Amino acid sequence: MPARRDTGAKEGAGFSMAPDFELKSDNLVRVQHGNKEEDVLKTINSVLGPLSTDKLGATLTHEHVQGSCAGLPQVYPEFLGEDYMERIVSKLKETKDGGIDTLVDAGTFDLGRDARMLAEASRLSGMNIIAATGVGVGGVPPLLGTFDADQWAKVFVRELTVGMEGTDIKAGIIKTASDFGGVQPSMEIALRGMARAQIQTGVPMTLHSYAAGQVARQQIAILKEEGVAMDRVKIDHLLDTTDLEYITWIADQGCYLGMDRMPQDNFNPRKCVSLDGRINTLKALIDLGYTKSMCLSHDEAIVSSLIDTLPQWHRDQLHEINPHLFLFINKVVWPRLREMGVSEDTRHEIMVENPRRFFEGTPR
């Protein structure tokens, strides 16, 4: 068993603060990078068990197999529509056949994460799925508002090293979220807990952020205070802005750029950047030399209590906007970028190599 590590935290609320495992000590591999040796994660957690980073392939780094709220799939499955499991497996198979090998499911417990369902969907479809620990965009539930950062770190480490929801299915990424209100006090405590879990395990972090309000500046400052290496952080939803100064500032801190919500944010379409604007932003960043910083995704969901309970006309409208779901980037965005002169090597770098480096911690 890996050695225990004393965090120096106090005991409280029935929590033992020393983590039971250190994921890093089992999965780190020392590799040569230039004149230096670096420790990188070569094996990560998928919902079906350990996965070599060499097997990630083309990866979408921020999607949702299903989106709802904590416990809804078990208690009120009607809100996910009829035969939702069959729809999930069918769409994942279609996505796999369309050239995507791995999907990062960014649904945390409060967004309805169902570890057993994710594992079964992966097994039946052949899609690699990476599940998330952490807290989503809904913020810290009020009844959990008294937890301190070390208590949060303890449960996040447990989900990364032991299992989620009473299973041995382990999370493979840490997810946090702050939106238009900035980093709220309760979320700051949880964010610091996630930062401490990241340092203890080496697992990377993906951050929902509000680009229009430049909320990543607050999030990054907190993570730096906690000692998180910025190359273990991805800031998401950056295609919701065309502010290249802000986006490149994030990349220059060392973070990965989560270029998602394509073709748009389904719930705030009038506030968001057009598809043309998003594609032009991608091309501008490539031209500026930020190819190795970007990870692409859609931030779509196969089934969702938000979407599947909408009137049929509204669902039809959303389907018309994106009839390809997780294949929109492959079928629409990359052909447009190729017309603009972007090479196949660049596509491979962004879709395959960047996610691999992000999970490993391999220097760019």
Image (cartoon, rainbow, N blue to C red):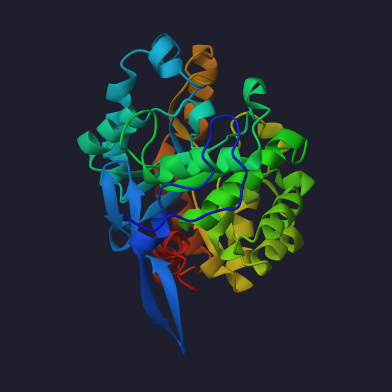
Image point (26%, 42%), residue name: 48
Percent position of residue 84, x then y: 34, 20
How many numbered marks, from 0 up? 0
Percent position of residue 102, x then y: 34, 49
Image point (60%, 43%), residue name: 150
Find residue 77 and report its image quarter: top left
Judged left or right of residue 47, residue 287 is: right
Judged left or right of residue 277, residue 42 is: left
Q: Residue furthest bottom?
A: 35
Find residue 187 and report its image quarter: top right
Front residue of 64/193: it is: 193
Percent position of residue 130, x then y: 38, 45
Q: Quadrant of the N terminus?
A: bottom left
Residue 93 appears in view = yes
Percent position of residue 23, x then y: 40, 55
Q: Is residue 69 above or below residue 92?
A: above
Q: Is residue 327 above or below residue 77?
A: below
Front residue of 316/265: it is: 265
Image point (58%, 34%), residue name: 136
